[in-house]
Image: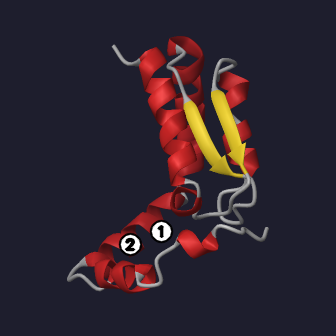
Amino acid sequence: MPDDRLDRIAPETWTLDQAGLDRPGNKEIQLQLFWDYQFNLEDYPAFQEYFRTHRPPLLAAWGRGDEIFGPVGAEAFARDLPDAEIHLLDAGHFALETHGEEIAGLVRDFLGRHAK
């Protein structure tokens, strides 16, 4: 999905990301995370049961055009949390960079209603 706000992503962002990736020991940490992903699905029933039982407030601000974490991932929360607030933005994977002000507004509003 083309995004007319890509000019909001600073051109040096990839350099900063790479510097973080190049930190000593980070390669091993990332490999462990990738390894652990295979076990996520077996934990989903426990997460879903927690959601159904405890009904925590949930805000999902998601890029409708995210090719890595598609909108179906956000919409799935509604099955167990019917009161979930799901906002599918006209954005891709870098929604925070391209729609930061909009997401910040959603978060402020959400916390204003739910934070105690």
| Quarter of the picture holding the C terminus | top left
| Residue position marked by numbered label 2 in the rendering | 30
Circle 1 packing at 10 Å, graded few (<14), some (14-19), many (20+), is few
- CB under 8 Å between callouts 2 and 1? yes
Query: In which image quadrant can residue 53 be found?
Result: top right
Q: What residue type is disc 2 on?
A: Gln
Residue that extends furthest to the right in the rendered view of this protein: 1
> Image point 75% across, 60% down: which residue?
65
Which colour assignment does the render follow?
Answer: secondary structure
> Image point 52% across, 56% down: which residue?
96
Instruction: State the image coordinates of residue 79 (x, y, percent, origin top left).
Output: 73, 26
Which secondary structure, mark 2?
A: helix
Q: Nearer the viewer, residue 38 or 17?
A: 17
Position of 60 compared to 33: left or right?
A: right
Q: Is residue 66 above or below residue 72?
A: below
Residue that extends furthest to the left in the rendered view of this protein: 24
| Residue position marked by numbered label 1 in the rendering | 34
